[in-house]
Amino acid sequence: MVKKSEKQKKRSRIGKWLAVMLIGVVLVIGTTGGLVHFGIIELPFMKSVIDRFQNKDEDGVIYEMASRMVDAVNQNDLEEINKQLFYTQESLENEEVMALYESDRGDGNGIIGEIIKQDSMKLIAVEEDVVYYEITHPQLGTMLQDLKLNDLTEEEVVKAIFSYVKKAKKITEEVEISYCYEDGLFSADYKSEEFVNALTGNMLISYQKLMQEMITEFKEGEEG
Amino acid sequence: MKRLLSIILCMVIILSSVTVVDAKGNKKYKYNIIKVEYSDNRGKLEELSVMTYKDNLYVDAKQIAKRLGYDVEVGDAGVTIFDKKSNGTKRARTMFEFGSTKIKHFLLKVSEAYQAPFESIKDGETAWIPLEYSLLTMNGSMLVVDGVITIDMPVENIMDIFMDAELISKYSFDWTDDLGYTETDWMTIGISSHLVNVFNGLLKKDGASWVQMAQSLALDSSSYDAKYGKEIAMLFCVQSNDELEQTVKQMKEKLEYITADGKLGKALSEIDKYHETNVAALYDACSALKDQIGAENPSSIGKYNRAYQELEDACDKATWFSHTGGVILQMQKEISGVTKGLNMIFKVAEVVGYAQEFQNQDEFSIQALETYIRGTDSSSLTSKAMKDSVIGHLNMLKSDVLTYSALRYLEENIDDLIMDAADLGSALGTQATLALIAWDFASGNIKWIADGLSSADQFELALYAMVLQGDALISYQEAKEALMFGKEDITAESLYKVSQYCYAYLKSCYIARSAALSSLEIKMQSKEMRERLRPMIEEQNRINEEIARCLVRLRNADKSNSRSCYGFLVEDNQKYLDENGGVQTAGKQDGEYTWAVEPTIEADNIYYLNGISWEETPVNLLHKQLGKDQNLGYAVIKKGDAYGLIDQNGELLEGMEYQSVDVYYSSYEMRYRKPHAKLGGDDVMEVALCEEGVVGVSYVRHGDSTYLYGGVYYWDDGLKKLSVYGHNKMPDPTETIPVKKGKVEEELADKEYRAEIDEWYETQKGKYAIYTNSRLVTDFIYDECGSCSEGLLAVCKNEKWGYVNENGEIIIPIEYDASWKEYSPKEGHRENGKREEYCYAATDGYVVLCKNNEWELRDIHGESVIPSGVFEELRPVYDGKCWAKKDGKWGVLEISDFEVDDGEIELWKQKYIETVKETERGTGEDKWGGYKLVYIDEDDIPELYIMSGIVALGDTLLTYKDGELVKLHLYSYGLSYMELQNMFRVGGGRMDRYHDYIYKIEDGKFVMLHKGEFGAEDNTNVQCDEEGNFIYEYVWDGIQVSKEEYEANLEAVYSEQEAKIGCEDICTGEEIIKMIEEL
């Protein structure tokens, strides 16, 4: 057996350390990826990498477009939410068209804005024709019925509703949104009842009940 | 050709039969004030300023636009017509560019390029635009009836609905905004209603779309949708009360076009007198009137004119008998019993009109609803169940629409309607009748008024209608935006689709509002509530009336824009141009030019010569052909080996006997081909030139130059002069000159011989620059440069020629070939010597150009006068005429028709300035005399008064006419004039002989009107009276009169008090030149 020289020994030690480091890096990446994949920790960049392997969004374009709603909700950007909800991408890219909708924009101090402040949203996955979101929102499905609004003034009604929204318990739902991506234009069906209810904490269910009560009330009043 | 004939007919009619209140005009523009009848002031004539130029009829843009209700701004480049908006702002509608046929017309806020049939013109401060064409862009039109122009006032069309920025805010129905429910009001109805109202308010704070979406999702219930789908379809497709009233109103407005008040109605009355009162005969009467009008108007006018369209409908047999099942024939008996004479045709027109309107309603509304419903996609707010329900009932309606339609009612009740009421509109408009035909269904009446049976239903229906309203609004906006900003052209067909969406939106607003108002019945039980709600209900009803007006207009939408329902579209512009012979260019086509001398002269060439005048003219001014004053109107004519001189009457000077024609000093040098008897003697075939005289040569002295100094201007770090009188012994140039760089050697500086100076200048290589007003205005960039003429200089660069003005600006691009092959450099003169290629100078306001052997004529502004390809060759213009070659022969063209006004104005200015420069009064050391511009007659060109300041010389008065200056010599200080009254007095005299001559200016001539003279019978022995006054004799117009009579006669024709003195406010030459240039 030939004895190794000092130099050879040194090289050997360096090689070992390199191998250990490499294994360590792989382990870290793999562990982190797993933790991210299962949602234990959040690392957007890692997530997009994983998604790219899972999904067919090779360019990440659809992901980016679908993320706009997520960003808008998480940043409480009601104007962006309104744009995504009510206008097409074509209109959005046309300043003259958007100028026509100037009068449609509210002052942002309404109930929707208040609910959005309590919401948070995640983009779970982008698959063919469908995007999966996870929305955490306050529970408002019986808000207008729970509140004893009968004897309140208008100002008191508004205060009560806002207070209810802030204090309401939160739940998390997964929502599936169909989308279409063609010729560079992304169009998602955000106006579906499912998504709007998730976004607004099922407030529409409460509103629907109120509308029915109103119609019944009208009929009873007529007969009376 | 058709267009020319029709315009000429139009012009003949207008100018021959319409009262001309005032007419004046210069040679090019003829101004008139004519009487027209506007549709909002029928039976009365108003004045309108028009102008004719080149057989085209123009109107004063400001006057016509303001009369039609628009705003207008006149700029330097063009005139813009604005729509006035209700909030006081204005929106650009149409822009006419001066000197161009280009028009910008705004459709849906987008500027579209249009083209007028001929150019718009600015003359002074007035903008003139094509009359008929401009009316079309302003939603008006014209018709000539019995020699009177009738003008339709603009009416709002469908495009105005699209352009209404407040459409949505005005007409969308909103519970809170429109009904203004207070908290108490809602409490009265119910707590839930109140809470809904509050909640909607909160939603709206985040955007109006949230309210619509929330309502849509909240109301999503299939049972409700199915129920209201039917109601909505029904209500959509039949006429509401308001719509019916608006239809009646619209019909009355249409019928007014052919009533007896207006010109058309009166014309119809004239024809009516001669016909029996039966329907068939009346049809013939209308047809006869149509033929008459057709003869008075170009064929396209009827297409655009509403009055004519109504007349067409009134006697359109196909319309009479289609769909109405021969109603008109059936009506005949009833009509003849009830009405007589002219009223019968109106009754027929009225019935037919209503039938058409009701049919329109049925067809259009069904199509609109179907287009809208089928056009919505999954993102629509309206639920699928609702849409399916609407479609289902729509199909039913299509097959049985007559059951529900006003047309059916009309047909079934026409006899009674006519018998009971002479005014059909009133009959249709009564409330009771409306209740029968509007919103009336075969099964299950839905009553909207009183009894409150279905207030709850109305309330719910209003909610659903609001969902439809929101959805329809999105569809309409998307369709409109696609047209405005997309690639699709704005055509009648694309606008038809937008019209349908707009109709769907407005009708849903109407239904929602009506339903909401009807739901208030439950609240109208107490008097107090009724009083409180009345103003609000009236306001909402007013809004619905406005909506109904829009709906009635929208129903006139069609895919061809045959009745200009969208106004004047781009496709209509093209059709209009096609019908009127296209765009008129400055040039005419072959066969439309005027020959002063018919093209029958055979010659190889006809051309002009340049002069040499060694002693008198700087070289820089010689690079052009002899001017009019110098060439005496002659051009050189060449035929084989024979040459001659020919004038513009086609007459030769002594025939074609010469073997050469050249210029030598101040003469034409013409060498005979054969020995000439004049010079007598020998047969000499060869001619030798010698100083003392030559054999066989004739000299024809041409005109003198006006210059006094020979030499040359050149550049050597500044402008230098070299003349026969020595270095720098020339005055500064008074006009624009071409210069080259040069270096003068000392020995040349004092040369006296012009030949050496010229020779030296020729040896100076290098390029030319332009020198004006003591400075260079270009660099030394031109290979050749002609002398200035008419403000232009021919320049050559890289063997291509063009023209620049005195500022060095390129007026005619440098892309032409040399137009003058007979230019003689100095050594080329005599015996057909050396010739070079050059370009003719501009003359009489025109320039001849040649490119690839194709000749054209432009004016000095670069505008085309004769396009290339019409004539084989052209020569410079003199006295408004030029030589032209056609089919191998030469003739003289009359160019005076093409004179451009600006050029004419520039010409008189140039003439005056040249005269001022030549006479140089008030300058230099004497500073005597001066100049003044005086306005004696009414034209825009003033007279030039030159006061010499020296009695012996006297004064001069000049007037300008047709390119010429006419002079009148006056006694010094003797001029006085009555400004703009075409009267002036020349007084003066000396040594007891005096005069008062009264003149006017007529056709460019000074015409003496009166001649007054007085003085001593013998001025060597003047007698005095007792008081020491001289005894004079007075003669007035050849008759001896007393002094008092003389003075009375003078006063009677000339008011010295009103007159201005000629010699007051005199200017120097420099001042007057500036004044002239600034005019």
Image (cartoon, coloured by chain):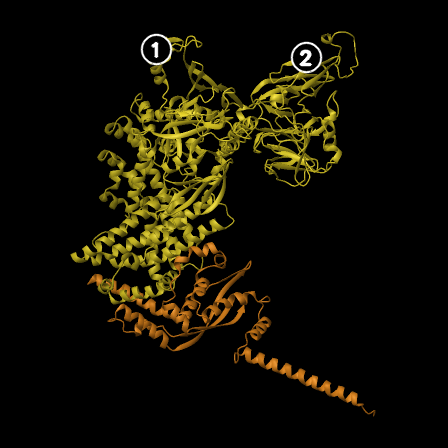
Chain colours: A orange, B yellow
Amino acid type, mark 2: Gly
Q: Is residue B104 above or below residue B940?
A: below
The answer for which chain carries disc 2 is: B
Q: Is residue B825 visible?
A: no
Q: What residue does disc 1 label?
A: B1025
Label 2: how many residues lie within 10 Å, few (<14), some (14-19) or many (20+)? few
Of the pair B908 and B605, the residue shown nearer to us: B908
Which secondary structure, mark 2? strand
Quarter holding residue B794: top right
- In the picture as drawn, the residue positioned furthest to the left comes out as B527
Q: Nearer the viewer, mark 1 or mark 2?
A: 1
Label 1: how many residues lie within 10 Å, few (<14), some (14-19) or many (20+)? few
**Residue B750, percent from left and from top:** 72, 31
The answer for which chain carries disc 1 is: B
What numbered label is drawn on residue B811? none
CA separation in Å, label 1 and label 2 = 69 Å
Q: Residue at x 47, y 51 (%)?
A: B482
- Taking the image as shown, residue B874 lies to the left or right of residue A70, namely right
Of the pair A101 and B467, the residue shown nearer to us: A101
Q: What residue does disc 2 label?
A: B655
**Residue B638, percent from left and from top:** 70, 19
Which quadrant would the N terminus of chain A be assigned to in this image?
bottom right
Q: Is residue B881 above or below residue B438?
A: above
